[in-house]
Image (tube, rainbow, N blue to C red):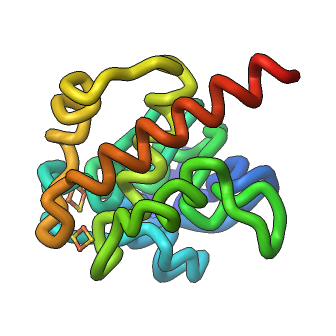
Amino acid sequence: MPRMSADANHRIRFKLNGRMVEADAEPRMLLTDFLRYNLAMTGTHVGCEHGVCGACTIEIDGVPARACLTLAVQADGADIRTIEGLAPAPGRLSVLQEAFRRHHALQCGFCTAGILLSLECYLRDNPSPDEATLRDYLGGHLCRCTGYVTIIAAALDAAERLRDANKDA
Ligand code: FES
Ligand code: FES
């Protein structure tokens, strides 16, 4: 039986922002590189490349994950959301994105995609966070610009609006 070379590409299929994607990936390719270079999804940023800064955070099967610590082949069969899939429709922003805009919760924006993805997951599971808990949670993301004050304000504001919306639903 022929043996597959360790360098042979693997065909992977996964859901990306609601649409099925099928493509070949080298076995050692990182998911960050695969998203950015093979699929031209450049909203996922790359900072430290070893799991510390949080810039590359995406959502995999409903939980935040570091794309720089994930191999592209591990995406096979997964349901993935990146920053490109956060807005509910073209020309509209999510409740959290709107809150970031209202509170000026970004400056250079390098950290923002990862923080938004993380907070979207977090607020889904923790609809009534307090400031201390949010600060602790955001310790997994490095932001060199904002001092986090406006990010926390935006997250608390979004949480309240999401709670109100769910009450009315
Ligand atoms: S680039 Fe992935 S955590 Fe920094
Ligand atoms: S807005 Fe610049 S690093 Fe966070």
Rendering quarter of residue 86: bottom right
In this view, 37 is above or below 5: below
From the viewer's perspective, tell me whether residue 48 is left or right of residue 5.
left
Q: Position of residue 135 (x, y in %)?
A: 19, 35
**Residue in view at x 82 percent, y 72 percent:** 90
Look at the image and tell me whether residue 9 can be seen: yes
Look at the image and tell me whether residue 7 can be seen: no
Q: Position of residue 3 (x, y in %)?
A: 46, 51
From the viewer's perspective, tell me whether residue 69 is left or right of residue 139.
right
Q: In terms of image quarters, where does ligand 2 lie?
A: bottom left
The N terminus is located in which quarter?
Answer: top right
Rendering quarter of residue 23: bottom right
**Residue in view at x 72 percent, y 48 percent:** 15
**Residue in view at x 42 percent, y 42 percent:** 155
**Residue in view at x 70 percent, y 26 percent:** 164
The C terminus is located in which quarter?
Answer: top right
Q: Position of residue 101 (x, y in %)?
A: 50, 67
Q: Position of residue 136 (x, y in %)?
A: 17, 30
Q: Nearer the viewer, residue 26 or 107?
A: 107
The residue furthest right is 169
